């Protein structure tokens, strides 16, 4: 079993008594306890070089196919998989033979997100540097498929080249339907081909954070041809994770999405808190750790020596020296899904509800006017987004969210938590974000201020 510098949770000295926080985290500790252990290893905090995972039980291709068929309800549509995999069932010794001929240990690296932790940037980087990964012995199912299906329609290329469509094969059918991410069995076949060739497998898909125990059993069976399996999960502070979810929820809102415009910040945050736990780092870790020994959690907030993309390719992915070097020194690395300021649209929407100020009837108008609002605030008034009157979370809700965030980080990274980059840093960051990111503009008073009444009335006249 992988030995690490930190344990996932303390020996119980940090228990809170009573209340929502105390109860929820006592339950979390019970869920995170495996085989009666009080602490769970498997998380690398300072990201020292990984130790080899204990050998995975080898199964030749025929047994892998059998295991996948058993979990047909989790993977693709069972009939499709049985039909597809039957085409290689007569090659049951290929994987065993190739592993005997291949002198180095093979690795499968499965990056499970979670959502809102920069997974899209890592996926984009794997696409940009796929040749360097290949030089390091890593071959991706989507890259194999893109070569095979070259010349097909863009829709087909997207399906066969999307890592989410690989991960979706291990999700319950109802989740595949609701998320609109179908399983593409060709991606699973390409992974088996990679195993046949004795190559390493890297897959990055935040879709994995919805995996359930049945899907994990299927994933364990699928990954059995590789000698070592590394599961990578990113950690983002709970309050920051919640803020990001809120921004995602509202940033693409349309004028017709009334609830997304009018919901109070308290209702929005509490509503989000009810739906995100199963996909959060602690919950994903507790499920995954029951099936895989080598589970690495990367702290997004520890930027002492590398950024989060570099941490993945240089520290979480074993023996990827060529890829690490080019990621560190290249200017091609792209950070996607950057946040957007919502406050200017909130102000514009509030003004539009006051028909005496301005009338907005289309989403294009909303975009145009909110851009003008931002320009007026920052260029004409020489103010910032922080200078508006805001309605923020009430003190008791702020305290609840802060305590929850502190407790999670204390459980995950006790050593770092007690360092200057830990508790003190978290509290300082929360203090800043509680005054803006966990707030909404005061929609009642701001549009009525003299400078804004003048701005909107002038805009309406033009």
Image (cartoon, rainbow, N blue to C red):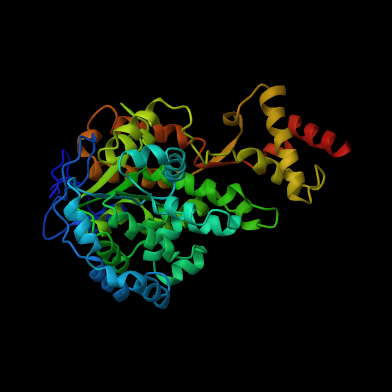
Which part of the image, by quadrant, shows the C terminus? top right
**In the depicted view, which residue is nearer to us: 382 or 216?**
216
**In the depicted view, which residue is nearer to us: 118 or 196?**
196
Q: Tell me where residue 196 appears, x and y as whole percent.
A: 28, 57
Residue 170 vs 354, above or below: the answer is below
Horizontal arrangement in the rendering, residue 298 relative to residue 345 (left or right)? left
Extreme residue toward the right, this view: 461
Residue 30 vs 393, above or below: the answer is below
Q: Residue at x 58, y 50 (%)?
A: 250
Answer with the quarter of the image where residue 441 lies.
top right
Answer with the quarter of the image where residue 236 lies.
top left
Q: How many marks?
A: 0
Q: Tell me where residue 450 appears, x and y as whole percent.
A: 75, 31
Residue 176 vs 126, above or below: the answer is below
Horizontal arrangement in the rendering, residue 264 relative to residue 23 (left or right)? right
Q: Residue at x 12, y 61 (%)?
A: 35
Residue 293, visible in the rendered structure = no
Q: Tell me where residue 245 appears, x and y as whole percent.
A: 48, 49
Q: Residue at x 46, y 33 (%)?
A: 333
Q: Residue at x 29, y 49 (%)?
A: 199
Q: Tell me where residue 181 appears, x and y as whole percent.
A: 49, 62
Extreme residue toward the bottom, this view: 79
Residue 274, visible in the rendered structure = yes
């Amino acid at each position: 079993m992988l030995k690490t510098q930190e344990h996932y949770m303390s020996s119980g000295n940090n228990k809170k008594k009573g209340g929502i926080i105390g109860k929820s985290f006592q339950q979390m500790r019970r869920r995170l306890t495996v085989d009666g252990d009080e602490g769970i290893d498997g998380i690398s905090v300072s990201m020292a070089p990984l130790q080899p995972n204990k050998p995975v039980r080898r199964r030749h291709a025929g047994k892998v196919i059998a295991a996948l068929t058993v979990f047909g309800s989790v993977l693709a549509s069972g009939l499709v998989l049985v039909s597809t995999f039957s085409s290689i069932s007569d090659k049951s010794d290929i994987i065993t033979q190739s592993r005997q001929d291949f002198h180095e240990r093979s690795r499968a690296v499965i990056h499970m997100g979670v959502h809102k932790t920069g997974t899209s940037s890592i996926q984009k980087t794997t696409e940009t540097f796929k040749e360097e990964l290949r030089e390091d012995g890593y071959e991706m199912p989507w890259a194999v498929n893109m070569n095979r299906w070259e010349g097909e329609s863009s829709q087909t290329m997207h399906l066969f080249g999307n890592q989410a469509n690989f991960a979706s094969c291990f999700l319950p059918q109802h989740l595949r339907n609701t998320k609109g991410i179908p399983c593409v069995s060709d991606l699973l076949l390409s992974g088996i081909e990679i195993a046949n060739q004795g190559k390493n497998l890297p897959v990055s898909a935040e879709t994995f954070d919805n995996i359930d125990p049945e899907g994990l059993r299927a994933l364990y069976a699928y990954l059995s041809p590789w000698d070592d399996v590394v599961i990578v999960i990113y950690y983002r502070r709970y309050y920051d994770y919640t803020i990001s979810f809120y921004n995602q929820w509202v940033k693409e809102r349309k004028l017709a999405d009334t609830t997304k415009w009018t919901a109070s910040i308290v209702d929005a945050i509490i509503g989000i808190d009810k739906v995100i736990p199963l996909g959060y780092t602690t919950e994903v870790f507790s499920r995954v750790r029951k099936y895989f020994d080598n589970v690495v959690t990367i702290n997004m907030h520890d930027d002492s020596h590398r950024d989060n993309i570099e941490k993945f390719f240089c520290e979480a992915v074993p023996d990827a020296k060529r890829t690490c070097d080019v990621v560190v020194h290249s200017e091609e690395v792209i950070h996607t899904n950057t946040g957007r300021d919502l406050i200017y649209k909130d102000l514009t929407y509030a003004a539009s509800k006051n028909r005496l100020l301005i009338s907005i009837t289309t989403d294009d108008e909303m975009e145009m006017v909110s851009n003008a609002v931002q320009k007026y605030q920052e260029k004409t008034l020489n103010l910032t987004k922080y200078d508006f009157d805001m309605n923020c979370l009430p003190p008791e809700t702020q305290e609840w969210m802060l305590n929850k965030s502190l407790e999670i980080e204390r459980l995950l990274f006790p050593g770092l938590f007690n360092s200057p980059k830990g508790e003190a840093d978290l509290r300082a960051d929360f203090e800043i974000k509680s005054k803006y990111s966990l707030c909404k503009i005061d929609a009642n008073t701001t549009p009525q201020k003299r400078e804004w009444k003048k701005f909107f009335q002038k805009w309406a006249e033009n």
